[in-house]
Image (cartoon, grey):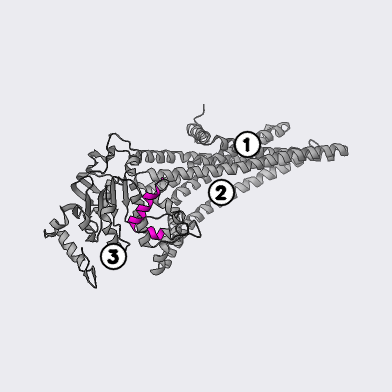
């Protein structure tokens, strides 16, 4: 048994065929059927037209000629209509398969561990591995079936001439075949090299067209810089495309040269046979059409083989991608190994935790603290002190390099991540409001009681704004997907993000700069409700506005990745340390006509 066929490893080929069949059997059958009928049309045309010409040249009766014409037309029409029907079904199934691929890759992007989501290595690997998905290569294998069926038909027609003619045509096709393999190899390498530039183009297009970037680009005059970057990247792609195109042009020129020699050879040979009376004009027409088709098929067949070989070359990328996903989806795939950890509210323990971002300097060094169930704690510190990093580690967006993080005394690595995330609520500093309905932004696909939603909106201070919307909770936000979508201000968006966190029945609530987009009065109102908002939850608050800290049971002060102070507001104000300095520095800015806000 062959292990290789024209450089194609049969083991890899069998695996790809098996994967394609298992992924979508209907699609495979439709593609094979469509290509089969595509091939039959070529053979039927040669035989049908040859039969009509033969009937005319031999002066058969009109009724006989008419019968041959009608039979040919009916067969051709039936095959053509069947082919078109299968082509329609193929396009439908191809769309379904493509959607499945897109969904699979999107789902895996949500499952892969957070640190890898935006790494260039992962994005390049993901993009290249898509080329080996069955949805994109089934058609290539279908074309191979079409070529095989056509070859069978052509060889049947050639049966009266002899094998040496076929041998001559094959010999004249060898240079074109070799050029085809070389061309596919060059295109494979080009696709590998162009991936980064395509990702840059996608990002630049997104930057130039999306609403989120529009204000900054206009206000700061960034149009020219972005346009230059887009143009420079496009020019690099064009250079590589030109280089590939020049090589392909040379290859095609050689291919056409030998194709011309094939045509010349066939014309001379069949004309000679007509002069000698060995074949009729009808047979001349049929044989010339057959040999022309054969030469074209031969080049197309090996071009298809080269394409299959290139597809097989991507198989290792799919293996690499699948291995990467399997090895780096540890958080998503984690399962409970401990029982009865979900008692609410949660206690939290950081035990000698150290962490650095990949390739960076230490961000946290030997951090240890304990938070009691139901305790309200504020994290305070300058930018880069490590406050938000503590939250990212707590939510398993990253894993600590050293130490342990525990919820109710259980290491969070031993918890089912999906169950864990159901038990926690967070208002992120860089929150995101989706272009869907208010209800979907609040609950996604969860079902919540109306009272719970109303209470969350009230506590977040956005109940009245939502009540004024045309369709209330069913109103779409922004105009990305709905021309009637409502726009929210930054502060309103932050309030909605807070309401989203409050909708969940959680054991832990984390508020990371929850009022950064609010004016001081709105912020003051939110903090007045903080006791009610945090009721029943262990709560962590991160805010540079220290007016919030007085609502906390305890305050943790971070500096340069270390925990340097902890205590109540009163205790820390009596200690001449960083907290006192930061608090007094801010206090003088929170004034109004009747005096100082209480801070």
- Circle 2 sits in a helix, a strand or a loop, which is it? helix
Q: Residue furthest top?
A: 1
Viewer-side residue, 520 vs 74: 520
Q: Residue furthest front?
A: 451
Viewer-side residue, 130 vs 102: 102
Looking at the picture, how far across and down is residue 259, in whole percent? 64, 45
Q: Which residue is mark 1?
A: 33
Q: Residue furthest left?
A: 575
Q: Count neighbours of disc 1 (C-alpha within 10 A) and say few if under 14, some if 14 to 19, many if 20 or more.
A: many
Say whether marks 1 and 3 touch (CB < 8 Å).
Answer: no
Q: Which residue is mark 3?
A: 520
Tell me: residue 266, above or below residue 587.
above
The secondary structure that dominates the magenta segment is: helix
Q: Which residues are magenta?
A: 446-466
- Looking at the rendered structure, which numbered label has been put on residue 251? 2
- Circle 3 sits in a helix, a strand or a loop, which is it? helix
Q: Is residue 283 visible?
A: no
Q: Say which label, 2 or 1, has the lower sequence index.
A: 1
Q: Is residue 22 visible?
A: yes
- Circle 1 sits in a helix, a strand or a loop, which is it? helix
Looking at the picture, how far across and down is residue 284, in whole percent? 76, 40
Q: Say which label, 1 or 3, has the lower sequence index.
A: 1
- Looking at the rendered structure, which numbered label has been put on residue 2? none
């Amino acid at each position: 048994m062959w292990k290789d066929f024209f450089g194609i490893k049969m083991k890899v080929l069998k695996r790809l065929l098996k994967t394609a069949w298992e992924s979508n059997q209907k699609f495979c059958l439709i593609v094979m059927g469509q290509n089969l009928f595509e091939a039959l049309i070529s053979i039927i045309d040669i035989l049908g037209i040859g039969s009509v010409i033969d009937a005319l040249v031999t002066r058969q009766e009109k009724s006989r000629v008419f019968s041959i014409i009608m039979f040919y037309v009916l067969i051709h029409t039936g095959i053509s209509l069947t082919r078109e029907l299968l082509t329609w079904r193929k396009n439908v199934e191809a769309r379904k398969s493509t959607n499945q691929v897109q969904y699979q890759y999107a789902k895996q992007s949500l499952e892969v561990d957070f640190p890898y989501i935006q790494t260039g290595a992962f994005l390049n690997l993901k993009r290249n591995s898509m080329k080996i998905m069955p949805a994109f290569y089934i058609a290539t294998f279908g074309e191979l079936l079409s070529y095989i069926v056509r070859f069978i038909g052509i060889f049947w027609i050639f049966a009266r001439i002899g094998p040496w003619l076929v041998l001559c045509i094959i010999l004249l096709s060898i240079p074109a075949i070799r050029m085809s393999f070389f061309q596919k190899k060059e295109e494979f390498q080009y696709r590998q090299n162009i991936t980064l530039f395509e990702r840059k183009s996608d990002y630049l297009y997104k930057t130039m067209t999306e609403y989120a970037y529009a204000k900054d680009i206009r206000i700061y005059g960034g149009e020219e810089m972005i346009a230059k970057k887009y143009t420079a990247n496009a020019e690099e792609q064009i250079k590589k495309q030109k280089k590939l195109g020049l090589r392909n042009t040379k290859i095609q020129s050689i291919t056409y040269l030998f194709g011309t020699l094939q045509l010349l050879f066939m014309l001379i040979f069949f004309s000679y046979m007509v002069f000698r009376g060995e074949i009729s004009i009808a047979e001349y027409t049929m044989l010339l059409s057959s040999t022309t088709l054969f030469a074209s098929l031969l080049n197309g067949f090996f071009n298809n083989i080269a394409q299959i070989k290139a597809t097989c070359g991507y198989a290792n990328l799919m293996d690499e991608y699948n291995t990467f996903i399997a090895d780096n989806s540890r958080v998503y795939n984690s399962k409970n190994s401990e029982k009865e950890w979900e008692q609410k509210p949660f206690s939290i323990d950081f035990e000698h935790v150290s962490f650095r971002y990949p390739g960076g300097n230490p961000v946290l060094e030997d951090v240890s603290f304990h938070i009691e169930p139901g305790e309200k704690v504020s994290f305070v510190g300058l930018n880069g002190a490590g406050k938000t990093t503590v939250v990212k580690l707590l939510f398993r967006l990253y894993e600590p390099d050293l130490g342990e993080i525990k919820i109710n005394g259980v290491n969070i690595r031993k918890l089912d991540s999906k169950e864990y995330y159901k038990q926690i609520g967070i208002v992120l500093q860089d929150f995101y409001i989706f272009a869907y309905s208010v209800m979907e932004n609040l609950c996604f696909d969860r079902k919540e009681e109306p009272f719970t939603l109303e209470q969350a909106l009230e506590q977040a201070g956005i109940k009245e704004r939502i009540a004024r919307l045309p369709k209330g909770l069913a109103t779409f936000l922004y105009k990305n997907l709905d021309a009637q979508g409502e726009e929210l201000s930054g502060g309103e968006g932050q309030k909605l993000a807070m309401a989203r966190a409050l909708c969940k029945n959680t054991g832990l609530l984390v508020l990371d700069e929850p009022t950064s987009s609010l004016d001081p009065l709105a912020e003051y109102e939110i903090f007045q409700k903080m006791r009610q908002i945090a009721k029943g939850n262990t709560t962590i608050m991160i805010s540079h506005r220290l007016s919030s800290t007085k609502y906390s049971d305890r305050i943790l002060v971070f500096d340069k990745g270390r925990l340097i102070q902890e205590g109540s507001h009163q205790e820390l104000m009596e200690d001449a340390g960083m907290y006192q300095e930061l608090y007094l520095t801010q206090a003088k800015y929170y004034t109004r006509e009747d005096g100082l806000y209480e801070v």
